[in-house]
Image: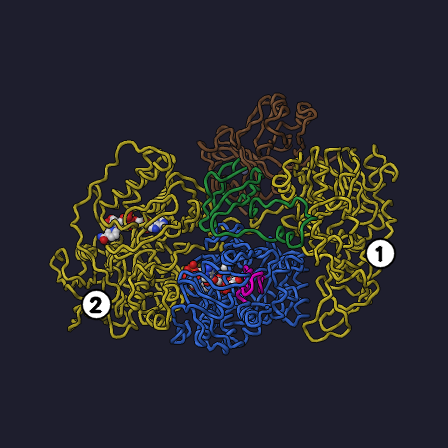
Chain colours: A blue, B brown, C green, D yellow
């Protein structure tokens, strides 16, 4: 039996860019591709180019630990992530592509009394928002994930966990390729090795983008460049409240199934699942300083391993096979920015930081709406740039303190 | 009335040919903040028997050990019961200085013997080679996961100043790391 | 593990430092006189260049001094001679 | 001696098991060489296709022969050193984790050097020797058990002796010198910024630590890591018995093992001829040398050479039984009987670490592979690692690199290094760069044996429109197995190039990432496990709390006593008893963990005015004030008391968890914004032990212990402090209260903490209480806990603490933000009290509040949530604190807490539920 599902025979072609498009999407990651797909599908807008500086979906989309959940604290967040989760639930059929979406549940562990309070708070908030959520005691955690060490004798014992049964993981690359293929089939141009080097603005309105493949005129320019958002926005004179950091992840060799769910622990900075092939996929916290280097520092990995073994003694003799990093853009309130900018026709989708993979279909849906209507969808309206001026932040690190 | 109790009172010293680890409790420690170019700095130096070391990462030893902690900060360390605070205050007069008794803030662990460098290298990222970190050098740095002040003495000796609340952790860590350099059975390993 | 040149202690491992973000962002002279936009700019907006970046570091596990350095965020190289106490 | 061992080969016998059968090998064997010596050809079935697979290479590049050894999964049989009792099982691509506790130790060591040499082959040994001569501090690390790199594989001589002997002597000589460190069995697996490299040393099952991580900071690095022989993609190239020519040569020369009886050699270059010669000398019959080139440069020592030929098929299901060779340009093939097929597609420099360091690679058309181009760090590459493929060349190249590195590190090279004599080598004939033997169907042309990826798979990927090797990697999974494509990586690129008609140089490689070889999780965790995982911080009273049976609460790294159960008590009873003791009599708590910062200097008062929301400069010497700090965004950051010791000196207390953050915060503002302020801040958190004495009986207890202190309310008023003697100890007593009761905090030198505490307990009337009781008492009084009743989105006004926000000061940190649209909204969440309609009903902390008694369909807007919730004896009811939207305008309103299908009614009240008039604070 082959563990790679049969891919379709044709994914996408590589056309030369036209001189002009109705919509140019900057960045061919998951978000850019999903946006293009929903522009075509929901709004019939197909004169669209997705410009990608490297290989398609080779940014954070190729690097994330693929955790999908919607159990965020604030109503605004729950709204958009739950919308995304509902889309995930039908995405394989919608795209006609195997994306290995596995609703194996996500546990968020609590290790201190304050963790417990915050977790319970989030569970209750989730329920009011119609998001499935449970609070589990240590024994129940053990039932769902028998390999978690729930002994009270460890340095930071597991006092309980929140559990979202509908949460899970998907195969990141296939998700990207599924969106790409479907978008390309509807006429969207996917253009690789095409870096946007400037955004042309005249009279307060966007005109075109400059790229390594020449100038491309556009009615609307929609940024979806994740870690590079500030660099691109700056060329249009738009400043964004984001900072770019490396975020590392690693995998083990392939192992027989041991880990049935997804476990995240913010307090000890570990999150881990076992991918369908059998590798343990694991991540930690961001490297603290700004960097575009797509590599992190090694002590972060070492610390992560000691934390991982506290929770999962059974991992002791597994091996780290590969480490890597993505570069993520982090906002002051750990929530994204999706909406308009001061430049007419220039839209921005950024600041998903360490947790935007799960939003892919949801943000694609809402961003496409924003592009098509020139106004945000109600689900992304709270995530405007203005919130930093008014102070109406959607602060997801304060109480929830759960990244990814 | 109960005795004074040092943070590592319950810790059994290690004493082997190659490696010795013991607490030196109850030393007098004064945190001194003063502009090194000021008159007060000079006067304090006179009172302590040697100018305040201004080369980063060095210490002097006269009436007391004076460890460079920062460009305007020193840790003055004297024998148990030595009223250094009064000496320094008197020398400083009314100048703008910061003088704070921190005697119980940190305790001191002596790590001595030819294996001391090997032991510390398990948890300290500094280059401790005698050419680089020989007698008279000191540094604030990390040892394992605790912040420490490290001072090199003659004969492969080190003084490790550690915050009292971390002392138990650090002692456990040192013993665990030391096991390799000690005769079998010296340390009951955890 | 970057080797960060503390102007006082010399080069030390990155783990001894706390990152302070962009340098030279002064606290506004008179915050009360700022518009909400200007105040938001001070609070939340920092440069995020790919390339040379003047930034602040605090040698928390060492001398506890803040200092500025110019680092290239594309390569992580800290420019020699650009570290100021 | 076992059957396939060369006659006369000596060695101590070692017994081992493989797949449940007993075998013997010799000391010095790897599991792979011992298996070959025993005639075991098939190690396991391939993971996806279930094809039999054998041993393909001889070291870390092995793509096939995976084994499980006891609890350790996914080891390469080619790198497992044979030891007595070894029990291994072949694996089909997936390992097993077992529940067995790993009792081995692991550790890490920091090391520094002027020159780090990676690789102890001829190039590395020469480099290290030259560098060591200069007086530089040198570390040389090599991943193999014995010195010499590939020398023991090739049986070449150096300086007139066997290469392995020369290497061993050279490395031993280095090992004995001061300032030189030799690390054997040590793989350098990561090359990070600023010449920081990490290596893992395999010290053995019985060593003090089984594996050790070396964290090396090197001024200069010499990479002398050698080269890997390249495979060729042809039909049936995965059969057991197909092996890299150099590896077969290594089995013969290093281990005295003949991997087969009759071999066909398939090559594109000269190096396989030497392999054939060595194997023939060892007793393997060489049936033919199949050379893709039209004219090979040297004779085959009597062996038939088929020039311009390729291998087009391999016979034999379980292993090679015959090899079909055909002219490259088509034409009839010929089947040759053989049980071994040796392959050499040329050599690829091992550029992993160089690439990890940030260096650029370029494609070298001469050797048909990628080589180091420009470096970004202080690194040299020497020997085969940069495409030098002769022994003499490697020695010279290594010596030159060692000299350059030492000089760059500031050392002087005196004299010259005598490059040892090596036998003359014939000039090599140009190699051909053939990666792929054309076939009708590519379904058994394997590019990645471990991932079962064939040329057909790669072509399917390019056929689907993929153009990038990164996409092909992810589409096919080529290069993603445990060997990280050491052999398959460049081959995959080459096949993509073939499919797309692009030169290999244009396609490049996929990204090289750490670790170079897999490294154990436990190895990386090192000593930071169990009790040493994260420091435990304790107070000077800790042992007393332990002896008294207190469970502990983790607060940051601190251990704080949570409550003190007496025999038969559960937590609830113990806490109610402790609360009662404080409200009715007197209790004591260890408050030593509170952060304490000594703030001195002429501008200290001005400084605190800027840091705190309230005014501190008006505080009188001898007095104490409660204060709140905000971040510039106006959100509460910390709170605590400020006591004025002198005109120019204050002692600030912080919350337990925030002590370091507050000190850093103060330093940041002082150093970066207000360098003109003459203020010094010093942490004194652990200098002091603090005992909180609370309850109406506290005055009498204090009076008894401090006969010299006037304790009456007039002499020692609320919010003042006195220096005195308590229990004969120099003490500072503060009259402050976090419970609303008459209370004192007694501070003594931490060495005296236990003496004080024992004196307090010695009075016989004082009940020790823990953090839980403290929380209940403060909540009854409506005192918020930062981090529990706030979450980074709460302003002082939200907490009902307008009084702590100065209206007089022109500015302080956070002030401007209070005027923003959102922070001045009336429906912000306010801290209020809640009384459940059922006084026995304890609300869970974290529960939410809604407006209506029936729950509408989601999404239901929340009004806020419960931040603190307790049972209260004095209130005769449970109660809670909550952050509720517009809460202060809802006093008396009934709201609902949805709990498991029930809507629990609660009444909104003031957050101050007990003694709102403050009548009890004077006792
Ligand atoms: C290690 C790691 C773990 C993570 N784990 C999770 C997780 O478990 N769950 C989760 O939900 N999220 C996770 N994330 C976050 C998630 O990956 C990102 O939030 C999300 O992928 C961002 O959206 P995207 O897919 O469009 O970004 P990307 O895939 O990064 O897409 C942006 C694209 O823009 C391109 N680009 C940039 N500049 C230009 C330019 N000038 N011109 C043209 N193109 C340009 C980039 O090359 C890139 O392909 C993780 C991230 C990392 C790095
Ligand atoms: N005839 C040919 O075509 C040909 C081709 C290649 C090599 N050679 C011969 O091979 C020899 C090459 O000598 P050399 O010194 O350059 O290389 P080498 O292969 O002899 O030695 C390199 C050593 O480095 C070790 N190593 C590699 N990566 C490591 C890591 N990350 N950490 C620790 N150790 C690591 C290897 O295991 C090996 O022991 C020469 O004798 C040369 O003639 C010949
Ligand atoms: C969920 C997930 C699983 C992965 N599994 C493997 C794996 O089994 N083997 C492997 O070599 N890499 C694996 N990778 C890592 C990729 O090889 C690669 O490192 C990552 O996409 C980043 O790209 P880069 O290293 O080429 O920069 C995985 C990555 C992700 C996100
Ligand atoms: Zn410093």
Looking at the image, residue B190 sits to the left or right of residue D353; the answer is right
Q: Please state if D853 lies on the left or on the right of A354 as rendered.
A: right
Looking at the image, which residue sits at the far left?
D302
Quarter placement of the N terminus of chain D = bottom left
Magenta range is: A336-358
Magenta span has A353?
Answer: yes
x then y, percent, for residue A153: 61, 55
Q: Position of residue B135 (x, y in %)?
A: 50, 29
Name which quarter of the figure residue D791 lies in.
Answer: bottom right
Q: Which mark is residue D874?
A: 1
Q: Is residue A247 magenta?
A: no
Locate residue C20 relative to residue D40 in the image: left or right.
Answer: right
Q: Nearer the viewer, residue D597 or D99?
A: D597
The answer as to whether callout 2 falls within 8 Å of ligand 2 is no
Identify residue for label 2: D311
The image's mark for residue B126 is: none
Which image quadrant: the C terminus of chain D? Answer: top right
Q: Residue at x 44, y 31 (%)?
A: B131
Left or right: where D246 falls relative to D820: left
- Chain letter belonging to callout 2: D
Q: Gap between marks 1 and 2, in whole Å? A: 92 Å
Query: What SS does tag 1 mark?
Result: loop
What residue is shown at x 52% (from left), y 29% (from top)? B55
Q: In terms of secondary structure, where does tag 2 sit?
A: strand
């Amino acid at each position: 039996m082959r563990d790679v599902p049969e891919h379709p025979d044709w994914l996408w072609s590589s056309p030369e860019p036209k001189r002009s498009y109705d919509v140019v999407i900057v960045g061919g990651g998951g978000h850019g591709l999903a946006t293009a797909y929903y522009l075509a599908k929901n709004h019939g807008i197909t004169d669209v180019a997705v410009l990608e500086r490297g290989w398609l979906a080779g940014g954070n989309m190729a690097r994330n630990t693929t955790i999908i959940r919607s159990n965020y604290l604030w109503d605004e967040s729950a709204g958009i992530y739950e919308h995304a989760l509902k889309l995930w639930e039908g995405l394989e059929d919608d795209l006609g592509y195997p994306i290995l979406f596995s609703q194996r549940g996500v546990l968020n562990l609590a290790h201190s009394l304050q963790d417990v309070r915050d977790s319970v708070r989030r569970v209750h908030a989730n329920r009011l928002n119609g998001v499935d959520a449970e609070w589990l005691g240590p024994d129940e955690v053990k039932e769902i994930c028998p390999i978690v060490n729930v002994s009270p004798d460890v340095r930071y014992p597991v006092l309980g966990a929140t559990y979202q049964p509908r949460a899970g993981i998907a195969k990141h690359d296939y998700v990207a390729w599924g969106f790409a293929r479907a978008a390309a089939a509807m006429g969207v141009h996917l253009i690789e090795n095409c870096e946007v080097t400037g955004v042309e603005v005249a009279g307060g309105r966007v005109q075109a983008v400059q790229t390594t493949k020449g100038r491309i005129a556009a009615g609307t320019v929609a940024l979806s460049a994740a870690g590079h958002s500030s660099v691109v926005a700056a060329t249009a004179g738009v400043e964004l409240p984001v900072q770019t950091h490396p975020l590392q992840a690693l995998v083990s060799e392939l192992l027989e199934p041991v880990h049935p769910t997804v476990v995240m622990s913010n307090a000890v900075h570990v999150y881990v699942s076992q991918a369908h092939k059998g590798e343990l996929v694991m991540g930690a916290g961001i490297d603290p300083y700004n960097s575009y280097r797509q590599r992190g520092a090694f002590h972060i990995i070492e610390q992560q391993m000691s934390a991982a073994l506290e929770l999962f003694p059974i991992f002791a003799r597994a091996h780290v096979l590969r480490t890597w990093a993505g570069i993520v853009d982090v906002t002051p309130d750990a929530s994204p920015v999706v909406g308009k900018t001061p430049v007419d026709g220039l839209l921005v989708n950024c600041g998903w930081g360490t947790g935007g993979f799960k939003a892919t279909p949801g943000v694609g849906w809402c961003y496409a709406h924003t592009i098509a209507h020139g106004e945000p969808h109600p689900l992304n309206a709270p995530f405007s740039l203005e919130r930093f001026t008014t102070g109406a932040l959607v602060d997801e690190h304060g109480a929830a303190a759960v990244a990814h | 009335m109960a005795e004074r109790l040092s943070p590592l009172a319950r810790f059994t010293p290690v004493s082997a040919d190659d490696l010795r680890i013991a607490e030196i409790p109850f030393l007098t420690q004064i945190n001194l903040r003063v502009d090194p170019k000021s008159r007060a700095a000079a006067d304090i130096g006179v009172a302590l028997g040697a100018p305040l070391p201004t080369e980063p990462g060095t210490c002097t030893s006269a009436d007391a050990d004076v460890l460079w902690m920062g460009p305007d900060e020193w840790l003055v360390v004297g024998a148990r019961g030595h009223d250094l605070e009064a000496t320094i205050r008197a020398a400083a007069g009314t100048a703008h200085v910061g003088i704070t008794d921190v005697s119980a803030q940190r305790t001191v662990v002596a790590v001595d013997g030819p294996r001391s460098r090997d032991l510390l290298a398990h948890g300290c990222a500094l280059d401790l080679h005698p050419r680089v970190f020989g007698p008279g050098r000191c540094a604030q740095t990390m040892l394992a996961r605790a912040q420490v002040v490290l001072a090199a003495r003659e004969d492969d000796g080190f003084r490790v100043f550690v915050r009292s609340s971390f002392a138990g952790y650090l002692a456990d860590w040192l013993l665990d790391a030391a096991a390799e350099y000690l005769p079998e059975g010296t340390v009951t390993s955890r | 593990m970057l080797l960060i040149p503390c102007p006082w202690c010399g080069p030390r491992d990155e783990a001894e430092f706390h990152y302070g973000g962009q340098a030279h962002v002064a606290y506004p002279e008179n915050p009360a006189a700022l518009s909400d936009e200007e105040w938001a700019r001070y609070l939340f907006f920092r440069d995020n260049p790919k390339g040379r970046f003047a930034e602040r570091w605090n040698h928390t596990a060492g001398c506890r001094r803040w200092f500025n350095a110019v680092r290239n965020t594309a390569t992580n190289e800290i420019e020699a001679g650009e570290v100021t106490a | 001696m076992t059957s396939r061992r060369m006659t006369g080969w000596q060695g101590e016998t070692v017994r081992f098991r493989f797949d449940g059968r007993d075998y013997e090998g010799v000391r010095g064997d790897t599991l792979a060489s011992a298996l070959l010596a025993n005639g075991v050809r098939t190690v396991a079935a391939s993971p996806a296709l279930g094809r039999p697979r054998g041993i393909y290479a001889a070291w870390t590049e092995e793509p096939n022969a995976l084994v499980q050894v006891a609890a350790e999964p996914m080891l390469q049989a080619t790198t497992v050193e044979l030891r007595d009792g070894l029990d291994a099982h072949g694996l089909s691509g997936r390992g097993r984790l077992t529940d067995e506790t790993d009792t081995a130790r692991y550790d890490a060591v920091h090391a520094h050097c002027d020159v780090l040499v990676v690789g102890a082959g001829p190039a590395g040994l020469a480099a290290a020797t030259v560098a060591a001569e200069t007086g530089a501090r040198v570390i040389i690390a090599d991943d193999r058990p014995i010195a010499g790199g590939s020398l023991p594989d090739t049986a070449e001589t150096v300086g007139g002796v066997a290469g392995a002997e020369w290497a061993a002597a050279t490395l031993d000589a280095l090992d004995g010198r001061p300032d030189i460190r030799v690390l054997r069995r040590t793989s350098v697996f990561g090359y990070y910024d600023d010449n920081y490299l990490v290596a893992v040393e395999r010290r053995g099952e019985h060593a003090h630590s089984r594996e050790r991580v070396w964290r090396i900071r090197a001024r200069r690095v010499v990479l002398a890591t050698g080269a890997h022989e390249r495979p060729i993609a042809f039909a049936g190239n995965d059969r057991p018995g197909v092996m890299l020519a150099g590896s077969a040569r290594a089995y013969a020369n290093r281990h005295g093992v003949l991997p087969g009886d009759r071999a066909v050699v398939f090559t594109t270059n000269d190096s396989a001829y030497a392999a054939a010669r060595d194997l023939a000398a060892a007793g393997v019959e060489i049936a033919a040398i199949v050379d893709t080139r039209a004219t090979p440069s040297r004779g085959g020592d009597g062996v038939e050479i088929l020039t311009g030929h390729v291998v087009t098929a391999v016979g034999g299901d379980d292993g090679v039984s015959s090899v079909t060779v055909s002219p490259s340009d088509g034409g009839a093939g010929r089947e040759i009987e053989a049980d071994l097929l040796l392959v050499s597609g040329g050599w690829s420099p091992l550029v992993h670490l160089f690439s990890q360091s940030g260096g650029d690679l370029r494609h070298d058309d001469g050797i048909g592979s990628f080589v180091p181009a420009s470096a970004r760090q202080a690194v040299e590459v020497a020997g085969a690692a940069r495409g030098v493929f002769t022994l003499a060349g490697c020695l010279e190249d290594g010596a030159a690199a060692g000299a350059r590195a030492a000089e760059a590190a500031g050392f002087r090279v005196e004299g010259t290094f005598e490059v040892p004599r090596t036998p003359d080598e014939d000039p090599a004939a140009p190699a051909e760069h053939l990666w792929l033997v054309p076939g009708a169907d590519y379904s058994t042309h394997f590019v990645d044996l471990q991932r079962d990826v064939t040329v057909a798979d790669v072509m399917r990927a390019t056929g689907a429109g993929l153009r990038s090797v990164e996409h092909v990697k992810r589409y096919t999974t080529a290069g993603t197995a445990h060997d990280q494509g050491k052999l398959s990586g460049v081959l995959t690129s080459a096949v993509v190039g073939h499919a797309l008609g692009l030169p290999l140089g244009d396609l490049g490689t996929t990204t090289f990432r750490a670790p170079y070889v897999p490294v154990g999780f436990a190895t990386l965790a090192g000593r930071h496990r169990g009790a040493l995982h994260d420091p435990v911080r304790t107070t000077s009273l800790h042992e007393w709390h332990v002896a008294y049976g207190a469970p502990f609460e983790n607060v940051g790294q601190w251990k704080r006593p949570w409550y003190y159960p007496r025999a038969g008590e559960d937590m609830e009873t113990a806490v109610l008893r402790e609360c009662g003791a404080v409200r009715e009599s007197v209790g004591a708590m260890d408050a030593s963990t509170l952060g304490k910062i000594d703030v001195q200097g002429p501008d200290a008062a001005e400084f605190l005015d800027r840091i705190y929301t309230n005014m501190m400069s008006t505080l009188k010497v001898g007095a104490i004030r409660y204060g709140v700090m905000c971040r510039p965004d106006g959100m509460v950051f910390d709170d605590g008391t400020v006591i004025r010791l002198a005109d120019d000196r204050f002692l600030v207390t912080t919350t337990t968890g925030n002590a370091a953050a507050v000190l850093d915060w103060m330093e940041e503002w002082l150093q970066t914004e207000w360098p003109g302020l003459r203020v010094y801040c010093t942490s004194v958190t652990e200098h002091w032990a603090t005992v909180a004495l609370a309850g109406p009986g506290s005055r009498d207890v204090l009076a008894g212990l401090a006969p010299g202190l006037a304790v009456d309310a007039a002499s020692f008023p609320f919010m003042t402090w006195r220096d005195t003697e308590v229990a004969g100890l120099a003490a500072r007593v503060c009259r402050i209260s976090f419970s609303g009761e008459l209370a004192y905090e007694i501070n003594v030198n931490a060495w005296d903490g236990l003496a004080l505490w024992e004196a307090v307990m010695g009075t016989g009337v004082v009940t020790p209480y823990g953090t839980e009781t403290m929380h209940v008492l403060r909540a009854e009084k409506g005192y918020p806990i930062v981090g529990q009743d706030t979450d980074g989105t709460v302003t002082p006004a939200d907490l009902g603490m307008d009084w702590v926000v100065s209206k007089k000061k022109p500015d302080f940190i956070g002030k401007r933000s209070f005027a923003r649209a959102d922070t001045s909204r009336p429906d912000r969440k306010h801290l209020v009290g809640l009384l459940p309609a059922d006084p026995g009903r304890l609300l869970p902390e974290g529960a939410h509040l809604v407006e209506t008694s029936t729950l509408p369909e989601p999404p239901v807007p929340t009004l806020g949530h419960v931040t603190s919730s307790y049972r209260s004896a004095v209130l005769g009811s449970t109660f809670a604190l909550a952050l509720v939207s517009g809460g202060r305008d809802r006093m008396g309103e009934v709201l609902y807490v949805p709990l498991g299908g029930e809507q629990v009614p609660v009444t909104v009240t003031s957050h101050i539920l007990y003694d709102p008039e403050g009548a009890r604070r004077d006792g």
